[in-house]
Amino acid sequence: MSTDAESWERAAVAMALLRFAPGYLGGAIIRMRASPTRDRLMHPLKGLDLRRLHPTIADEQLFGGLDLAATLAVSHLVQSRGHFDAPCTALLVMAERCGSELGAKLAHQLDRDMGHCIIALDEGVDADEATPAALGERLPFHIAPDGRMPAGWALPAAVATRYDPTTVICSSEDLTTLTLVAAQFGIDSMRAPLLALRVARAHAAFQGRGEIDHGDLEIAVSLVFPHRATQVPQEPEAETEDATPPPPEPETEDAGNTQESLDLPEGDMLVEAIKALLPPDLLAGLVAPGTSRQSGGDGAGQKRKGNRRGRPLPSRPGRLDGQARIDLVATLRAAAPWQPIRRRQQPKARGLLIRPADIRLKRYQEQSDRLLIFTVDASGSAAMSRLNEAKGAVELLLAQAYAARDHVALVSFRGTQAEVLLPPTRSLVQTKRRLASLPGGGGTPLAVGLQTAALLAAQSRSKGLTPTIIVLTDGRANVALDGTPNRARAGEDAEQMARMIRSQGARTLVIDMSVRPQMSLRTLAGHCDGQYLALPRATAQTLTGAVSAALEA
C-alpha cells in the first residue's frame, strides 16, 4: 500500500494536469469533506472559470431554455443560454447527493467531447454516498488523499515549453500495454484505458515532450486504474522443487543477450506499480465509490416518485387532481411563448392566457425503508431446534438495521394458524421480549404463514416500506389453508400463496432448514420468483450472513 505522502504527490500531479488541460481530460472526483485542506487542494483551479452546479439544478440552467422575462417583454420567443452551450469547467457540489438522472445528463455532455470539464466535490462517508456511477466512469481522476497534507505541498514545477496534448505521439505498444494492464485488474470498461491514454498524453505535453515514454504510462495507470480495479492479478504459480531442471545454457551466449532476457516486460512493471495503490477494501469484495461497479445491499428500499416529499425532480406536464402540486414557474414558462397567438384569438381577455396543456406539476423522489419479514416455521420438534437459530438471526439482523435503515417483522406459524408476533419495528428491546416468549409445536400450516406474510407485506407497502419476505421452514406442510390436516392440499395452497406473493412484487428468500434439501421448497421459491437457500446445519451467525449475502446479491 502507498503512504500518505505518496497519495498527496499523486493528488498534486492530478491537479496540475487538470489545470493544464481541463477540457481534454474531462474532470475529476474530489472525495473530501469541506475543509481548509480541500480549499488548498483546489486552489490551483482558481484560475479557471468554474461554474457552480447544485444537485437540484434545473435543465433550463444546464442546457438553456425559455427566457421568461425577455419573452414577455418582446412578445416573441427568447432562448436563454445554458452552462454547456460552450466549453466550460463545472464545479458539481455535493456530488454524493446527485441523482442518477442528473449524472446521466452530465455524462452525456462529457461523451459529446466538446471540451467540458466537471469537478465533482464528493463529501460522502459511506459506500452508498457516492457520485453517480455513470458520471464517475467518465472522470479519469478519483482524488482522495490519505492523512494530512504534507508541509510545503505544491504542484509539480512547470516547464517553459509545453505541447498540445492532442498532438502527442503514442505507439501501438502503448495502447496494448494500457489495455492488458486494465484487463489484469478486472476493469471491463474500455473508457479506462482511453482515459489513461489521455492522461499519459497530457503528462507528456505538460513535461514538454511530444512523445509518450514509460514514465507517462506509469503516471497514467497510477491515477486512473487503482480505484477502478475489481480484482488483484493472480501470481504465476511457483515451480516445484522436484521439477526437471532446465538444460544448461550454451556457453557461447554473450552477456548482452543474457541481460536482455532478465528484463521484465513493461506491462508487468506497471502491474506492480498499481498493486501498491489498490484500495484496502478491494480484497473484501468492495469497489471504491465513483466507479461503475459498486456494492449493493445498502439497506435502503426502492426509489419512489411522489408529489409531496423527497428530492425535487424536474416538473412534468400533468393534470391537477386536487393532490398534485403545480409548478408555477414552469407553467408560466410553458405558457409564455403562446401568449401573442392566444392574445390575437382572445383580444378582450385580461392577464395571462393559460391552457391545461401548460400545467406543469412538481415531482419529488424519496427512498423508502426496507422491511424484512421473517416468516418462521415453529411447528414440531424438528422446527423447534431451528426456532432458536431464527431467534438469534433476527436479533443479529435487527442490530444491523440501525445502520442499514431496515425494519424487521416476525411472523410465526404452527398448529393451524399464523400470528404476527412482531409488527414492523426497529426496537431491539421489544424484539428480544417477543422472541423470548415465542412458542413452538403442532402442525405446519405453511400456506397460512405465507398468506399472513403477504398481507403484512401489502400493509407495509401502503405505508411506504419496501417489504422482503424471508421464509424459514423445513418444507413439511401438512395443514391446508382452511385448517384441515391434508398434506397434498397443504402443498397446493402453499404454491397458491407463493404465486400471490409474486403478484405483489415482494422480494422473497426461502431458506430450507431441513436436514436434507427439499425439492418442494425449491419449487415453492420458483413460484414466489424468489431465491432458494439450503442451510441444513445453520447457526444464528451463518443464517445472518446468508441472509445478508442474499439481500445484497
Image (tube, rainbow, N blue to C red):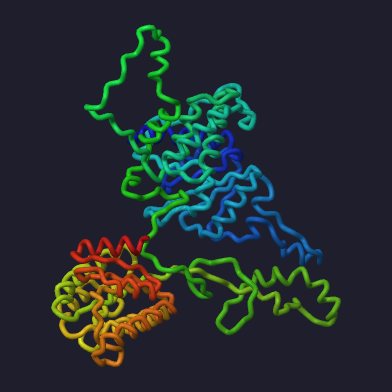
Question: Which residue: 53% across, 67% down?
Answer: 312
Quadrant of the image for the N terminus? Answer: top left
Q: Residue at x 73, y 72 (%)?
A: 335
Q: Can residue 22 be seen?
A: yes
345 with respect to 439 (left or right): right
Q: Quadrant of the C terminus?
A: bottom left
Q: Is residue 310 above or below residue 267?
A: below
Can see residue 407? Answer: no
Q: Report which quarter residue 477 is drawn in.
A: bottom left
* x, y percent for residue 539: 18, 64
545 vs 60, left or right, is left
Up/down of 70 relative to 19, above or below: below
Q: Quadrant of residue 449?
A: bottom left
- In the image, is residue 148 above or below residue 315? above
Q: Quadrant of residue 399?
A: bottom left
Numbered disc total: 0
Q: Position of residue 55 (x, y in %)?
A: 53, 58
Question: Taking 179 as reference, is 420 above or below it?
Answer: below
Q: Position of residue 282 (x, y in %)?
A: 35, 45
User: Looking at the image, which residue is at 41% across and 29% down?
Assistant: 268
Q: Nearer the viewer, residue 416 or 57?
A: 416
Residue 241, x across and y down, in percent = 22, 27
